[in-house]
Each structure stands twice: as C-alpha cells, then as structure tokens.
Image: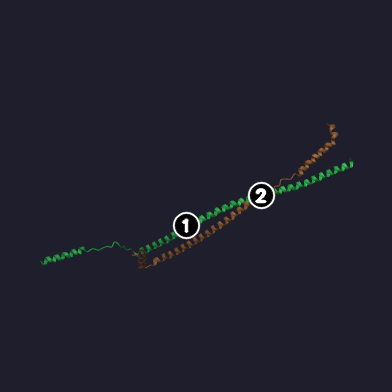
Chain colours: A green, B brown
Amino acid sequence: MKNTLFLLFFMVSFVSFSQKETKIDTNQICFPSNVGKQILLDLNELDRLKENKILTDNEISELEKKIVKQDSVISKLEQKDANNQLIVKGVEEKYKLVEEDNKDLRNKLKWSGIKSSIVEGISGLLMATFVYIELFK
Amino acid sequence: MKTFIKKYHNQLLLVLLTTLVVFLLIKVFTPAPDKSELLKYKLNELDTKINGLKEIQIQLDDSIKVYKLEIKRIDENIDNIRSQKTVVNNYYENKAKEIPGMTNKQVDSTLRKRYNF
C-alpha cells in the first residue's frame, strides 16, 4: 500500500512536470534597437513626404490658378492688340481724309487763281471792246 | 463759204467770243460741291469709333491690373508654401539626425507614443 501510494505520487508529479511548457505571446514582437531606429527613420521620412505632398498639392493648385489668370491676361492683351490695330487703322483713315481734303483745298486755291485770271481777262476784253466801240465807231 | 466767212467774219468772231465768254463765266461761277460737311461727319464718325476703342482699352487695362494683382497674391502664396516646405524639410532632417543617437528607451517611447500601446 505504501509502495502503491509512493508510485502514484511519483506518477502524478511526473505527469504535472511533463505538462509544463513555455508559452509564447503572439501579440507582441521584439526586434533589435537598430531595427527600431531604422523604423523611426522610415517613419520620419514618411511623415516628411506626407507633409511635402500636401504642400506640393497646394503649390500645384496655386500654380494652376496662376496659369488661368495668366491666360486671361494674355487674352486681354490680345484684345488690346486687336483694338490698337483698329485705332491705328482709324487714325490712318483720318489722316487719309484730311490729306484728301488738303489736296482739294490746294486745287480750289489753284482754281480760284485761275478764276481771277479769267475774270480779269474777260473784264479786260470787255473794256477793250467798249473802248474799241467808243473810239472807232 | 469763203465769201460768207469774209462777209460775216466780224459777227462770227463776236459769236465765238460771246460763246467762249459765256462758257468761261458758267465754269467760273459754278460753285464747287462743298465737301467740308461730309468730311467733318466722316472725321467725327472716326473720332467716335476711336474714342470708343480707347474706352475699351482703358477697361482692358483695368482688368489686366486686377489680374496682375491676383497673380501677385498667388505668387505670394506660392512663396509662402515653398518656405513652409523648407521649414518642414529642415524639421524632419533635424529629427532624422537625432534618431541614430536615441537610447533604446527613447526609441521604445517614441514608437509607443506614435501607435498608442
């Protein structure tokens, strides 16, 4: 009986010993500190790039706005150019009209000189006729 | 014919001279059409057209001024963004220089802080 009890105790303790095992926590991982530092460097780079992306997007949006405004300025300048051409054409037309008028006035002046000569000639002729008639008839 | 001319040469000469004189008088005293009113009208029309165009030019100049001011404002925004980028890059460069000198505890706490564990 004593031996049986001893054997039983021994077996139970053996079984309990054999059940003991090392448990691994799968929720946690462990890595060397240099890997941790590398992770931090990578995260730092990620943060930098994220912020740069936001700022670059803003810059692109501003540049697009600038392009739209510059296109509008170009369009207005083209309109101005077309208007300037019309103004130049108008001024040229005015100049042409005034030049033609000047030419007309010069002709009129010349013609008025001729007219006075004709009137003088006719008057002379009439006078000569009258004198001729008075003296010789 | 010769005798006719010899006989009436004085009368013929008188008729010819009278015709010439009448023709010259008509020519001399016919008033030339006055073009000055038409010219004035045409010049006024052109002036109105040119002044209208000048008004449009002034309006266009004003619009261009407004656009240029807006472009200046956008340029300022772009400069601001670029300086922000420089600040951000400097900040992260300095941070990157600090990381290799960190202790294990600092690395651990930084990661804990970031991921809340």
Across and down, in percent, residue B35 comes to 70, 47
Whether the residues at callouts 1 and 2 have beta carbons within 8 Å, the answer is: no
Front tag of 1 and 2: 2
> Is residue B61 positioned above or below A119 on the image?
below
Is A16 on the left or on the right of A119, as rendered?
left
Quadrant showing the C terminus of chain B:
bottom left
- Cα gap from disc 1 to disc 2, whole angstroms: 54 Å
Q: x and y percent of residue A126 in the render?
A: 83, 43
| Disc 1 packing (10 Å; few <14; some 14–19; many ≥20) | some
Q: Which residue is mark 2?
A: B41
Tell me which residue sits at (54%, 58%) in the image. B66
Could you say which disc has been placed on residue A61 in the image?
A: 1
- The amino acid pointed to by label 2 is Tyr
Name the residue nearer the viewer: A79 or B76.
Answer: A79
Q: Nearer the viewer, residue B42 or B97?
A: B42
Q: Residue under mark 1: which chain is it in?
A: A
Percent x, y for residue B67?
54, 57
The quadrant where residue A29 appears: bottom left
In which chain is the residue bearing label 2? B
Q: Amino acid at mark 1?
A: Ser
Query: Would you say B15 lies left or right of B56 here?
Result: right
Q: Residue at x 74, y 47 (%)?
A: A108
Asked if residue B116 is positioned above or below residue B17 in the image, the reply reads below
